[in-house]
Amino acid sequence: MSFPEPFYRWRPHPWHGLDAGPNPPKIVTAYIELTPFDSVKYELDKATGYVRVDRPHRGSAQPPALYGFIPRTYCGSETAKLSSPDAKRGDGDPLDICVISERPITRSDIILNARVVGGLQMVDNGEADDKIIAVFEKDLFWGKSTEIDQLPPNMVERLTHYFSTYKLVPGSVSKVQISQVYGREYAERVIQAAMADYDREYGSG
């Protein structure tokens, strides 16, 4: 990725100013908002491109992997078509991604290249909110993984449990539904749909 010299005078917006990746949908850019060590929910402020402190996690669970999104993606109508029949629409956010890294990465507001291996088909309050699962491309342990079944089952189970429960309020009914764990091929279709939704919503220029 090369840019003219004046580009470097300003930081690009993480959602709109970065590429989806060097070889999407196989190798994508992951912009990281949360690390496995965060007990506070941080997320991108869409207006400014800075990381905003959103809220403390309600429970004791922390993200089991690096968590962020793929730039220049948008969960709209095409993405929702690939989700559960219970999804009425996309959630209107960039496509979320969880990245597995053997070495601890302790800071957020960073980017890395991630190899896509699968995903979680998730609906949150009637909106498609899939979570792509990937590995850090340069990771010495997981970087060559190409399918989700090459990861330890407990690792995927932790991701599923976290997203099933992280918004749960005692005494209330969960609005989150994870209908399936899917492999790389389907995950790549979801990413392509989210890239098409982005182009439709914001243009491809």
Image (cartoon, rainbow, N blue to C red):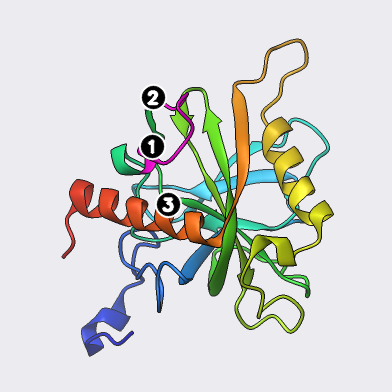
Segment colored magenta? 79-87
Residue type at the position of mark 2: Lys
- The answer to whether residue 191 is visible is yes
Please tell me which residue is depicted at 75% across the width and 53% down the height of the picture. 64
Q: Residues within 10 Å of mark 3 (few under 14, many from 20)?
A: many
Can residue 34 be seen from the camera position used here? no
Look at 29% across and 87% down and name the residue there: 2
Check disc 1: other Cα within 10 Å, few if <14, some if 14-19, many if 20+: many
Q: Earlier in the sequence, mark 1 or mark 2?
A: 1
- Which numbered tag is attached to residue 88? 2
Residue 56 pos. (x, y %): 69, 37
Residue 168 picture location, percent across and down? 71, 24
Residue 178 vertical position relative to residue 143 in the rendered view, above or below: above
Q: Real-space Cα distance between discs 3 and 1?
A: 9 Å
Instruction: Identify which residue, 181 or 56, lies in the foreground.
Output: 181
Q: In the rendered view of the protein, which quadrant contains the C terminus?
A: bottom left
Check if mark 1's residue and mark 2's residue have beta carbons within 8 Å: yes
Q: Pinpoint residue 93: horizontal percent, then vertical percent.
A: 40, 43
The residue beneath circle 1 is 80
The disc label shown at residue 70, or none: none
Give me the residue at 38% from left, 24% from top.
Answer: 88
Q: Amino acid at mark 3?
A: Val
